[in-house]
Image (cartoon, helix red, strand yellow):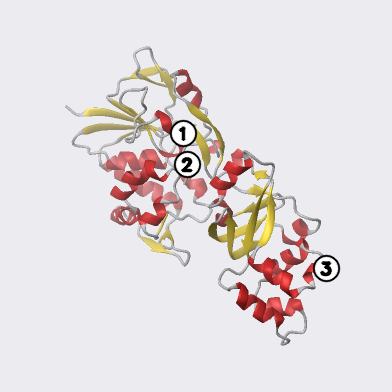
Amino acid sequence: MKKRISIIGGGVAGMICAAFLDPSKFQVTLIEKNKALGRKFLVAGKGGFNLTHSESIEEMILKYEPPQLLKVALMRFDNNSWRTWLKDIGVPTMVGSSGRVYPEEGIKPIDVVRKVSDHIIARGVEVKLNHKWNGWDDSGNLIIEDAAIESDIIIFSLGGASWSVTGSDGKWSRMFLEQGVRCVPHSPANCGFQIEWPAGIKERLGGKPLKNISICYKGRIATGEVVITDRGLEGNAIYMQSYALQKNLCKKKKVVIEIDLKPMMSIEDVMEILTIEKYKNLTAALRDGIKLEKEKIKLLKGLTSKDTFSDRYKVGRLIKSLPLEILSAYPIEGAISTLGGISKDEISTQYEVNKLKDTYCIGEMVDWWA
């Protein structure tokens, strides 16, 4: 007789879990409170829409925190396995110049959700939409809407606490707390960070990107791009520093990052170009010699005094290490993902909840970070 598995939450984690459970061994039901699967995925897909990264799995594992908690799972099914599986269900991928992996041109987020949804239905998974989980009854059975359902195994994939419009609001933590399962309060994870810009920066550069830069914090370097906003900075280069920034902002009122505006050039090369007499002024040297984009030049001017900007040696050092004070993370509602949720200490190495037999938690609802 097949074991009955109930998966609560039809986001990415729940859908992929349902796609891999053996239909010859399990009778799988995927339960989602919204009228469609993958709503947060659709929202996230409006941005860069990268599905993974092409780097080695050993490098990728180090970008999870804590890496050891996910190492076994990631080694068994790595980024190349993921791309192969996507291709098998009709979602071919390509590697971008940054190393990130995207669906091939023309494939939209809704197309990916439909391919995965069609695949799990073809495998015999029963999908129940508009069905909300409301806790447990006295016998430990799930209460879905107003009815109790029996399950041999329960897998929760309820998401984090950002983008509440998609149903990802973190309110489920209260019910786990009532069962004695410790939950860490939610906080923003991959998110923008607040900077108090000097006068004029927001007006001249608000909404402008800084491309091909790197951000250094505590010796860790993240390369990519950011966007200057009225509040501060957004973009993948700052998101990759999010975990370390959040940890230190808990202890300090502000932290300092350093931006390299020209990571492909050494400080020696920058200084050599800036100090030759070929260019009539420093702005010309930055624009024509260093090939610094106008947004970066405006940022340098906006963050330095006239005396500093007239000193080529000081400007050269700032190009390679421009300090910015970070005051706080953006509010949780606008975060791409969140920290917090089920404490790592409450689950086994197989992601089973220690205090709830045959109950597992996966995805963003666990207090790990990627």
SS at circle 3: helix
| In contact (CB < 8 Å): disc 3 and disc 2 | no
Q: CA distance from mark 3 to mark 2?
A: 50 Å
Quadrant for residue 352, please give it: top left
Q: Nearer the viewer, residue 308 or 112?
A: 308
Q: Position of residue 79 (x, y in %)?
A: 35, 54
Which quadrant holds residue 127?
Answer: top left
The residue wearing badge 2 is 39
Q: Nearer the viewer, residue 164 or 101?
A: 101
For label 2, the SS is helix
- Please state which amino acid type lies under the numbered disc 3: Lys
Q: Quadrant of the N terminus?
A: top left
Q: Is residue 199 above or below residue 261?
A: above
Q: Residue at x 62, y 38 (%)?
A: 250
Identify the residue position indicated by label 3 in the image. 306
Q: Which mark is residue 34?
A: 1
